[in-house]
Image (tube, coloured by chain):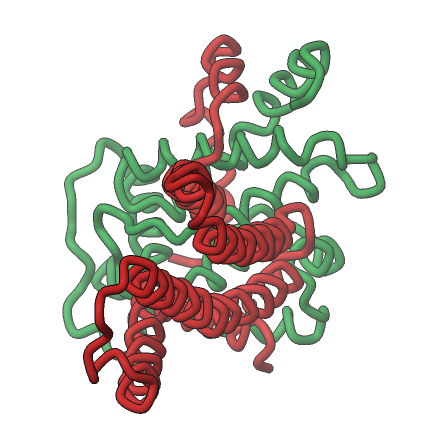
Amino acid sequence: MQPADAQDPFIHLVNDHRNILYKICRMYGATEPDRQDLFQEIVIQLWRSYPSFRGEARFSTWLYRIALNTAISDLRKQRRRITPVDPNELSAPLPDIPYSTEKDEQLQQLYAAIDRLTEVEKALTMLYLEDKSFHEMEEILGIPQNNLRVKIHRIKEKLRKMTKEAAYGIR
Amino acid sequence: MELDNLKTIWKEQQTLAPETDPARLSDLLRMGSRGPIARMRRNLRVEAFLMIITYIPTIIAYLTMVGGHLWLISLFLFVVLSLYAVYYYRKDLLLGKMQCVACEVRSNLARQVRTLRKYIRFYLWSGTLVILIAILVAWETLRYSMRLKAIPLHWWFQPAFQLPLISLFAVGLFYLNKWYVNKLYGRHVERLEKMLRELDED
């Protein structure tokens, strides 16, 4: 149990980085209750590991590690499990749902495509979209940078195909 | 849709995450983890507690019954309880080492696979052995009390008949345990190994 006076700075840090948590929960949780469960679990794991954070790595790097480790190795059965598919096997476009703006629609298409990636690919996509350097990705994931470059390239191709499929190849 | 555009859209979703209420976060910090390993540890402790509340009164009862003449049965049961204590302690130790959430994702996955494999092996072999010893002790206790009460032992109580039966039972128990352990953790280990392979492949 951490001292009570550590709570306030911790809560402040979590709130400062809430966007990262939000995006990870959105990526890995299939439904809203799954996302809430995951958010709760990540915050608990962050709090438990907080005394071990010595500032050697950036706070965001440390947070990414804990959040991704928690999301990836979760054993719980999600309420709606999504099976990753090969984009080449997509015969029909992703479901088209009416959205208020074009950007919202694009964001939903992006999430729909991400939903079809594997857990590892989701982690890489998250870091890529967050503009993380290969050095920082290596620090978070523990994969050599050469390997990361190859993987990111493949995922970009996969996402491009899937989002094009979703947009009927218009964009 | 080009991926560079996606990056811009991705970054613009910042407004979607409203500030979390500090009071709610403070409540969360007081809660226990509902993660798989935390649940496994909780279940293990419940199991150990049930063993203790079942065995201790039985040991005391045999120790105080019939003027302490059944002390040998108490000793048998105490040995079994001690074996279970070692078994639960080792399992808890392995579960405690199973994850390092603040480590790199790859090394955490490798650690989970390694420890979970060790845990499964331990669960399978020592679990089968402890159950078998517990049954043998119960069986011997029965024989011992029958002898004390001068009840004649039938032919099917003789070791020549019992040994093949016990061996057959041990094999059956092993495979039953294997099936059960695989049902509990098999898919999870496979999933973790698949992710680890995916991280390692070029």
**Frontmost residue, B113 versus A12:** B113
Residue B122 lies, in percent from the top left, at: 52, 69
In the rendered view, tell whether residue B109 sits above or below residue B100. below
Q: How many marks?
A: 0
Image quarter hosting the C terminus of chain A: bottom left
Task: Pick the residue in front: B59 or B44.
Answer: B59
Residue B49 appears in the figure: no
> How far from the left and from the top, in percent, is residue A128?
57, 55
Label the green chain with its letter. A
Which part of the image, by quadrant, shows the N terminus of chain A? top right
Identity of the residue drawn at 28% across and 48% down: A78
The structure residue drawn at horizontal position 61% and vertical position 33%, both measured from the top left corner, is A46
Residue B65 makes an appearance in the image:
yes
For residue A85, side relative to residue B88 (left or right) = left
Q: Which residue is drawn at 51% across and 46% down?
A: A70
Front-lying residue, B177 or A162: B177
Would you place residue B10 above or below residue A100 in this image?
below
Residue B188: % across, % down: 40, 64
**Residue A22 sits in quarter:** top left
Q: Which residue is drawn at 29% across and 86% down?
A: B168
> Which chain corresponds to the colour red?
B
Question: Height in image: B22 above or below B48?
Answer: above
Where does residue A31 sit, x and y in percent of width and height? Answer: 26, 40
Left or right: residue B198 versus residue B34 is right
